[in-house]
Amino acid sequence: MSLIRHSAVTHVGKVRQLNEDSILSLPDQRIWVVADGMGGHAAGDFASQTIVETVAAITPDLPPAERMQALRGALNASHVAVQAESARRGGATVGAAVVALMVTDGHFVAFWAGDCRLYRMRDGQIELLTTDHSLVAELVMTGRLSWDEADLHPQSNAITRAIGVGEEAGLEKIRGEILPGDRFLLCSDGLNKHAGFEVLRRAMAGTPIEIVADKLLQIALDGGGEDNVSVIVVDVI
């Protein structure tokens, strides 16, 4: 069985009064989650916290296939719970972007909705594994912007999917093989607004797991920290 290590941090940033991000690390179940409550909307903190609490309630010690289904089920259940809270508040928009990573021996699976991201660093190169559900992502996919340019676009915050918004959660899934030495990064957009691919690559390359999350957080804060910032780094050894 692969050895897994991680570090995680969430921070309100330098401008916001409330941290609407929530993070979850379940190393025994090899599950990690970053949820970003929708800024400017009612109860984004409720939405993100509902996600992590629902995932945290997954039955321990499930076989990998059942654990993956339980993770998807928990995310869908949180969608229903957040919708119910929205209805209780008279239809106010309540929602959160999310990315969830699960690692098993030799493979990973991730689910996401919105613009929380999953990157993988392998052999000194960094790759974005998720695709933002956002208006500017469509410009990236058609070749009109790079991801780094999209992060600076005035409409970069306009997401098209979120937990709690719309009839379905709109989860997207990616899975693949893992290799010893792989390093995964889950983050809210409070990080990638201030850290393009090369900045992330340099910051993550060779930085010990004990301090890498704090190092990435500091980059976002030094860049202005306009948004909440959440970072989880997972190493496969």
Image (cartoon, helix red, strand yellow):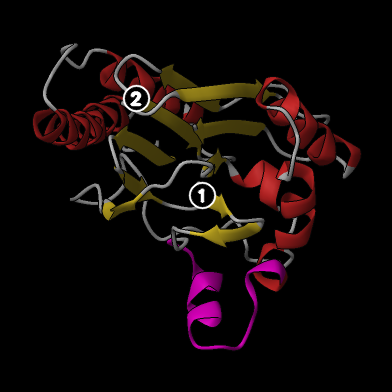
Residue 21 against residue 109 in the figure, above or below: above
Give the image quarter of residue 30. Answer: top left
Quadrant holding the N terminus: top left
Kindly identify the amino acid type of the residue bearing the numbered disc 1. Answer: Arg
Is residue 26 visible in the rendered image? The answer is: yes
**Along the line of sight, which residue is nearer the eye, 105 or 36?**
105
Q: Position of residue 70 (x, y in %)?
A: 14, 29
Q: Which residues are magenta?
A: 133-148
**Callout 2: SS:** loop
Kindly identify the amino acid type of the residue bearing the numbered disc 2. Answer: Arg
Q: Which residue is mark 1?
A: 117
Instruction: Tell me the distance, in whole angstroms, between the alpha carbons under discs 1 and 2.
Output: 18 Å
Give the image quarter of residue 106. Answer: top left
**Residue 110 as seen in the image, left or right of residue 7:** left
Q: Position of residue 45 (x, y in %)?
A: 50, 24
Discs 1, 2 touching: Cβ within 8 Å: no
Give the image quarter of residue 227. Answer: top right
Q: Position of residue 159 (x, y in %)?
A: 48, 58
